[in-house]
Image: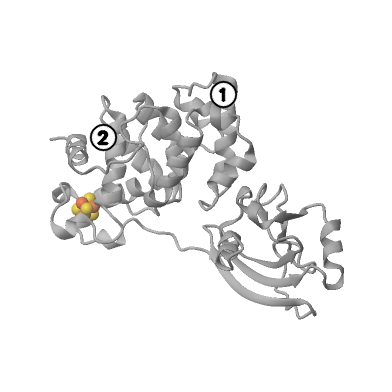
């Protein structure tokens, strides 16, 4: 049996049943791929179902408002994915009449679509011969072939791409791609891969297994320390069951979303920590969140709207607004701010 026959055979017996499998609709395949970037299948599944229900066709997504798309995306993080999803849907609708182009380069030219997603859509939906290379595939092939270049390096990816073009099933590139990703996700896993139980069909030809290098491959590059951002938020409750929100600027990580007003003395994301002991403002708690590219520190304070003209100050800020608590679900929040509001039962 060839490599691809063995792989597809394994896939036939072990694949998970997922709603975006065994379909040819490029819109739904693309949607699932964008949702699953940096997101686990279990976490992404309900989002996929909500998006498909609310926007069954690409034209439905194209004609939605950004506010609605972001609100539906809320909790998944990496909001540029949602904005790009929306922008790409508009292009498909406008330039291709709502029909995804059956062309790798045209798919790759859409916002938010890189080589991996373009190959996934092109092969799953149109059976075009483009190998997918994601983290699962990199791990599997690095171990199988004994590739010791750092996993994220261009050389490693080039080497893997070359071998996949040689190994891909040219009649069934879509199935081959799904099979190799699934094998990396379920069998050649980061910890406790199948070979530990003697069940891997590739064990006899696997470099890492033969050389005792399974735990050392793929080679990871040393990470640089992440930059730190600090945000000092005021929870300002006001009359008539309202609270104050802050609309993020158009130039930042959470543009188009809402959070809480920042302490006047720390208006920017990079502000140094402030110890605020002004009368009427009390410190509530400190939380942290680590993203792939930065570490965030959130300091939450509670402030009385009537304290030293705070209401007046907020009214004078173009990006601050007062909203009814029972309408908060219409606004998209960064996940840490939303969790904080949920934990203190504001949501
Ligand atoms: Fe992966 Fe182990 Fe199979 Fe090698 S033998 S491909 S390391 S599961």
Q: Is 228 or 338 nearer to us in this picture?
A: 338
Q: List x then y, in percent, for residue 157.
A: 40, 44
Indicate how the structure is coloured in the image: one colour
Q: CA distance from mark 1 to mark 2?
A: 36 Å
49 shown above or below 239:
above
SS of the residue at dot 2?
A: helix
SS of the residue at dot 1?
A: helix
> Can you see residue 142?
yes
State left or right for residue 226 relative to residue 208: right
State left or right for residue 264 relative to residue 32: right
Question: Could you tell me which residue is drawn at 17 percent across and 37 percent down?
Answer: 9
Q: List x then y, in percent, for residue 203.
A: 16, 51
340 shown above or below 180:
below
Q: Is 331 or 197 nearer to us in this picture?
A: 331
Lower position in the chain sequence, tag 1 or tag 2? 1
Residue identified by numbered label 1: 93
Mark 1 within 8 Å of ligand 1, using the beta carbon: no
Residue identified by numbered label 2: 167
- Quadrant location, the N terminus: top left
Name the image quarter holding residue 313.
bottom right
Callout 1 touching callout 2 (CB < 8 Å): no
Which dot, 1 or 2, sits closer to the camera?
A: 1
Specify the farthest residue to the top: 97
- Quadrant location, the C terminus: bottom right
Q: Which mark is residue 174?
A: none
Question: Could you tell me which residue is drawn at 59 percent across and 45 percent down?
Answer: 70
Q: List x then y, in percent, for residue 251.
A: 71, 49
Q: Is 193 or 49 nearer to us in this picture?
A: 49
């Amino acid at each position: 049996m060839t490599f691809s026959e063995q792989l597809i055979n394994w896939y036939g017996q072990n694949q998970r049943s997922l709603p975006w499998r065994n379909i040819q609709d490029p819109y739904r395949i693309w949607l699932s791929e964008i949702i699953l970037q940096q997101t686990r299948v279990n976490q992404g599944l309900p989002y996929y179902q909500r998006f498909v229900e609310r926007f069954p066709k690409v034209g439905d997504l194209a004609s939605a408002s950004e506010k609605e798309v972001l609100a539906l995306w809320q909790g998944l993080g990496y909001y540029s994915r949602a904005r790009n999803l929306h922008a790409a849907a508009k292009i498909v609708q406008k330039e291709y009449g709502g029909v995804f182009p059956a062309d790798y380069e045209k798919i790759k030219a859409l916002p938010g679509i890189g080589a991996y997603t373009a190959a996934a859509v092109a092969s799953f939906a149109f059976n075009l011969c483009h190998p997918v290379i994601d983290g699962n595939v990199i791990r599997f092939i690095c171990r199988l072939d004994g590739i010791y270049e750092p996993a994220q390096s261009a050389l490693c990816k080039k080497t893997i791409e070359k071998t996949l073009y040689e190994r891909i099933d040219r009649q069934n590139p879509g199935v081959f791609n799904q099979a190799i990703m699934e094998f990396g996700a379920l069998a050649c896993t980061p910890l406790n891969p199948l070979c530990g139980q003697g069940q891997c069909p590739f064990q006899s030809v696997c470099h890492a297994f033969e050389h005792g290098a399974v735990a050392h491959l793929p080679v990871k590059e040393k990470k640089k320390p992440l930059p730190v951002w600090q945000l000092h938020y005021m929870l300002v409750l006001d009359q008539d069951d309202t609270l104050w929100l802050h609309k993020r600027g158009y130039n930042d990580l959470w543009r188009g979303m809402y959070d809480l007003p920042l302490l006047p003395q720390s208006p920017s994301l990079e502000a140094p920590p402030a110890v605020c002991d002004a009368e009427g403002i009390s410190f509530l708690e400190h939380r942290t969140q680590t993203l792939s590219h930065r570490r965030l520190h959130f300091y939450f304070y509670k402030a009385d709207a009537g304290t030293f003209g705070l209401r007046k100050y907020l009214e004078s800020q173009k990006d601050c607004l007062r909203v009814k608590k029972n309408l908060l679900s219409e606004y998209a929040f960064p996940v840490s701010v939303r969790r904080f509001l949920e934990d203190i039962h504001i949501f």
